[in-house]
Structures are given as C-alpha cells and as structure tokens.
Image (cartoon, rainbow, N blue to C red):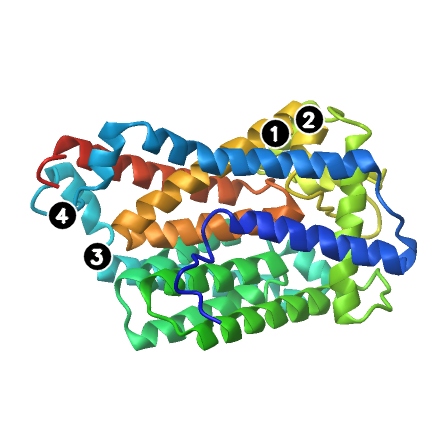
Amino acid sequence: MKFKSIDLFSPYILVAIIVIYTALAAIAYQEHLRNLQWISTTTWIYVLMGTLFFIAGVFAPKFLYNHSEKLKFLLSSPGVTEKNSEPWYNKIRVMLDERVVLAAVLIGILLQIINLYLLGGIPILSGYLKFKATTDLWRFAYPIFLPAITILLAKYPRKWYYLLFIIGLGVFAINGYRTTTMAILISGFITLYYTRKMKTSHILIAILLIGLVGVAAGYIAVMSIQWQQWSLNPLQLVAYRAGFTMMVFDKIVHMVGATGGDLFQQALSTGHPRVTVSQVVLNYPVSGSTPTTSITSTIFGPAVLDFGFYAMIIQMFIIGAVLRIIYAAQIKASGALTALYAIVLTHTMIWVETGPTDSVVYLFYLLAIVAVALYATQLMKNPSTS
C-alpha cells in the first residue's frame, strides 16, 4: 500500500473524520453503552448537509482558480524570495529566524512548567486540578509553544528539536486535556508529513501510535475525575464519547437558536461555551460541590444552538474554503505556512467532537490567514519575477 499519490492531509480528511466519528457513535447506540439511544433522522440530515457544505467550501477556491487566468499565473510563479520581496516582508521574515523561534519554544515550555508548579499538583491525575489547569498562564504558553515548535520542525530540522517537541508534549499533556495533547502530537506529525519524505510504513506506525495515545490520554483523563464513575474499557469509552456528543447535538437540533449567539461571543472571549452547552442543553447546575461540567456538541452544534441550520451550513462552507486556501498556500510556500496549516487542520479535526468554541483556535486561524494574505501580497507585487 502506497500513499505517494494521495495527500492524506488535504482538507477533505475532515470528511473522513466526520464519517469515522459518526460510525463510532452508531456503534455506541448499537451496543446501548450506558443506555445511549439512537438519534433522530433530522440530526443525521443536519450532519449530512453540514458535511456537504464543507465539501462545497473546499471546492469553491479550486473552482475560482480554474476560471481565473490571473490566479493561475500567480500560483504558477516560482514564489517569494528574499530578493524579490518588499523590505517590510523581509523584516517579518526576521521573526522566523531560528534563534527567535527557538526562544519562543523555550518560553512556552517554561511558562507551562511554572503553571504546573503554581497548580501544586498533576492535573491529569486530579479532576479538581484539571478544572483549574487552563489558567491565564496556560493561555499564553500554549499559543506560543505550538506555532513555534511546528515552525521549528518545518524550517530547521535539527535532531535535538525533536527532543524539545517531546518535552513540550509531556508538560502540556500533564495539564490533563486530551485535546491539547492530540493537537500538539497531530500538528507535529502533519508538519513532518509535508516536510520530510516519510515511508508508508512509518506513516502507518505513526497514525497507530497517535491513535493509541489518544485513547490512553482520554481514558486516563476520564478516570481521574473523582466525582464520576466509569465501568467502560478504553475502546468502549471512545465510542461512548462519540455517541454522547452526538446525542447532545441531537438535543440541540430540537432547540435551535436557544443561545442566540452567546456561544460564539464566549468563544471569542474568555467565556466557557461548553459549560453553557451543559447548562442550556442538559440542564446541568450552574454551580455546586463539584466543578461545572464541560460538554462537547460536535462541530455542528454551537452554530445550530446559537443561530440555527443556516448558520451551520455557512460555518461549514467558510471552514472548508479557508482550509483550502491555507492548504494551497502551504503547498506552494511550505515552511512556516505548512506549520500553520498543520495547526489549523488539526484543531479543525478536533472540532468534529468539541465544536468551534476555542478562542485560541480562532487565533491560530487568524494567524494563518494573515500569513497567507502577506504571502499573496508579495506574489501580486512581483508576479513576473517571483
């Protein structure tokens, strides 16, 4: 089996992730794990339509490219170099100097170590500490570390940088959140996939290891929550989480527009939209003797709960189009753009379960879009010589 003719991490991989996730949910319903019941036909239609509009979004930039001679001319040029780019663009390049990026990686790791020290324990082993682990210090550490380490791996492939990657992965995994662990791991792998010549066997082994880490991280994190009791094995837990999250979305489909934009507003601030989902959809208490529960609702859920069906399909179309544009740019420019694409694609795949409710991910999207815009500006400045 060879993957040379297949780009595993084009934006269309999100369709595969959605199919796999819904299949896991179906298994949970079939097995009646913890009494889960099948969701409604309407909800399946929402999932189908959301996925189709995502595909349309991915296809739209390609359609425009096929019908624009100017775009074809620009994208067929050799690219932007230090000689043909503007002085201001070259100054921005200085920010990607190896020493600057390395310093950012070290700062991110150091801030997270300080964060763990101030917490006074290991969050992954305590549900109470995990609830407090996403501090303001973490909100600085993670957005600094992840882009920096992926850019470092993409542009400056020194062997000891892989050790830094593992150390960073470890200190952020201790925070107890499976999504953070998987985001770092998958972003690094996608970056290496595009910047190194990986054998098919190595790709398969890496995917298997990432899957195992995901299952283990999720199981350890859940087992550490003292106020919950679980009797499911790790594989059953994966299926159950998918089934439960789809069940939450099913409830959302039958209460469209209930939050009236509140989730989106919270996602762009320091709010807790997933906690709001638990309160609005499942009537969980606002406060109590245990930390407030955070509930995921799939990539489709928040938009539907905020504004309804049309908001969902517009969201999915935009995500598809933006991913495709960043993807096309990284294929041409590589380097830092490849790292940024790896980050936004990874978090979008994670959104299939959690939903687009993370301000830090919007920050990564914004960073990638700005980088693409700057690169495109330079292509248009010197189309004949670039």
Residue 160, percent from left and from top: 33, 76
- In the picture, measured across the screen, residue 322 lies left or right of residue 116, that is left
Q: Quadrant of the C terminus?
A: top left
Residue 3 visible: yes
- Going from the N terminus, do you reach mark 2 or mark 3 first? 3
Q: Determine the CA span between mark 2 and mark 4.
A: 45 Å
Q: Comparing marks 3 and 1, which lies closer to the viewer?
A: 1
Q: Amino acid at mark 2?
A: Phe
Q: Which residue is mark 1?
A: 313
- Going from the N terminus, do you reach mark 2 or mark 4 first? 4
Q: Which residue is mark 4?
A: 81
Residue in view at x 73 percent, y 24 percent: 257
Q: Amino acid at mark 4?
A: Thr
Q: Amino acid at mark 1?
A: Ile
Q: Which residue is mark 2?
A: 309
Q: Secondary structure at mark 4?
A: loop
- Going from the N terminus, do you reach mark 3 or mark 1 first? 3
Mark 4–mark 1 CB contact (< 8 Å): no
Mark 3–mark 1 CB contact (< 8 Å): no
